[in-house]
């Protein structure tokens, strides 16, 4: 499916006709032009000939759900599914659906691969292929909206935590969010949309200006520059002092809560000392931390649940709001941030 082709085919059509097409695609979630019943037969035939609505994808569902022996968090997390979508140029992109507590969240990719090369991240280790277009970002969401419709459900949330760094593809990500947020289309509420960044400061500044209603998350993963630079090469470009100043500026401008993600890697960033250092860094109004057990994709090992709890207690004592979060989709090896497009 190629949104650009559809737009080209609609050049010269009146605005209301273009809106009808958009409604068929995004509200009726048609998968083939025969369902576009408000259009003339001629236009339908022209569209059918010029551009298929098919999204080529392979789904890897977690049919059975988490096993009975899984931890309570995992069982509560419910069913996830991963899809591999083949794009027009033959490259493929991964997207994940996470279903929990009555919410259906799509985890979208913004790039194929990622140029930032974080050492713990499967996407980072595969290198960078290219940015995704606005339409290719939208297509991932449309795919799951159609999938859920067949089960009588709707998509409620969307997070940019798939492959890639969204702020290195800012314009396309922003355009996709605007479209997906549009009430005449899918209408996903701004407060139900989140962007996770490795800390690209320019992107944070633009976001505070362009879309202050959307949730921001910063991948921190270390409480000091030395360790952060080892894990995330981008930390050399944006030292913590600058990143934290930008974070405070963001909260000052938007008055929104700001989430810091911290994956817990055994013996690397999970000591009591690290927790104390982190508490100093983050004990600010409207900051909070999500502690996430590292999902083993390479040589690192996840922290023990007991150490995660200790770490959390130290943060709380230090005046930092901290939550432990299960990384959805562990069961299908397709959790956010762990996609390698294989
Ligand atoms: N590039 C952005 C968004 C995509 S990654 C970013 O880095 O924030 C989404 C999240 O998944 C990030 O917090 C990332 O650090 C995390 N992540 C990457 N690999 C992971 C792994 N193996 N286990 C758990 N979280 C991981
Ligand atoms: Fe890129 Fe995010 Fe993975 Fe780092 S963690 S390599 S920024 S996708």
Image (tube, helix red, strand yellow):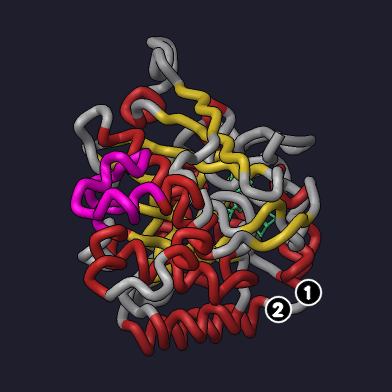
Q: Is residue 118 left or right of residue 254?
A: right
The picture quadrant where one finds residue 35 is: top left
- Camera sees residue 338: no
- What residue span does the magenta drawing correspond to? 23-45
- Camera sees residue 267: yes
Q: Which residue is mark 1?
A: 236
User: Which residue reaches farthest top?
Assistant: 68
| Residue situated in front as seen by the camera: 145 or 338 | 145
Instruction: Tell me the element at label 1.
Output: helix
Badge 1: residue crowd in 10 Å (few <14, some 14–19, many ≥20): few
Is residue 73 shown in magenta?
Answer: no
| Image quadrant in which the C terminus is located | top right
Q: Which residue is mark 2?
A: 239
Provide residue 40's location: percent of width, then percent of height. 25, 54
Residue under the image location 62 percent in, 46 percent down: 87
Residue under the image location 47 percent in, 51 percent down: 139
Q: Is residue 213 left or right of residue 113?
A: left
Provide residue 9's location: percent of width, then percent of height. 46, 63
The picture quadrant where one finds residue 213 is: bottom left
Is residue 43 shown in magenta?
Answer: yes
Q: Is mark 1 within 8 Å of ligand 2?
A: no
From what the image shows, is residue 48 above or below residue 4? above
Provide residue 135's location: percent of width, then percent of height. 50, 60
């Amino acid at each position: 499916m190629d949104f650009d082709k559809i737009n080209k085919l609609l050049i010269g059509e009146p605005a209301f006709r273009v809106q009808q097409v958009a409604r068929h695609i995004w509200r009726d979630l048609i998968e083939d032009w025969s369902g576009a019943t408000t259009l003339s037969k001629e236009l339908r035939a022209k569209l059918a000939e010029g551009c298929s609505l098919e999204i080529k994808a392979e789904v890897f569902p977690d049919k059975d759900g988490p096993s009975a022996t899984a931890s309570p968090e995992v069982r509560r997390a419910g069913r996830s599914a991963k899809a591999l979508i083949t794009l027009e140029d033959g490259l493929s992109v991964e997207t994940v659906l996470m279903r929990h507590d009555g919410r259906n969240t799509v985890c979208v990719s913004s790039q194929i691969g990622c140029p930032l090369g974080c050492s713990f991240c499967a996407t980072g280790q595969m290198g960078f292929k290219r940015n995704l277009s606005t339409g290719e970002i939208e297509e991932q969401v449309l795919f799951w909206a159609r999938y859920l419709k067949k089960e009588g459900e709707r998509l409620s949330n969307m997070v940019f935590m798939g492959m890639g760094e969204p702020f290195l593809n800012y314009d396309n990500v922003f355009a996709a969010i605007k479209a997906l947020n549009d009430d005449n289309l899918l209408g996903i509420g701004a407060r139900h949309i989140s962007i996770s960044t490795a800390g690209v400061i320019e992107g944070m500044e633009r976001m505070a200006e362009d879309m202050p209603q959307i949730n921001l998350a910063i991948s921190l993963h270390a409480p000091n520059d030395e360790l952060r630079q080892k894990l995330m090469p981008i930390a050399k470009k944006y030292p913590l002092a600058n990143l934290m100043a930008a974070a405070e500026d963001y909260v000052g401008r938007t008055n929104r809560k700001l989430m810091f993600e911290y994956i817990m890697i055994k013996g690397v960033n999970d000591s009591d000392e690290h927790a104390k250092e982190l508490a100093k860094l983050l004990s600010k109004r409207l900051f909070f931390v999500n502690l996430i057990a590292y999902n083993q994709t390479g040589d690192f090992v996840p922290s023990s649940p007991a150490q995660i709890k200790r770490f959390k207690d130290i943060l709380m004592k230090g005046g930092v709001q901290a939550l432990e979060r299960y990384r959805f989709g562990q069961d299908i090896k397709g959790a956010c941030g762990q996609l390698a497009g294989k």
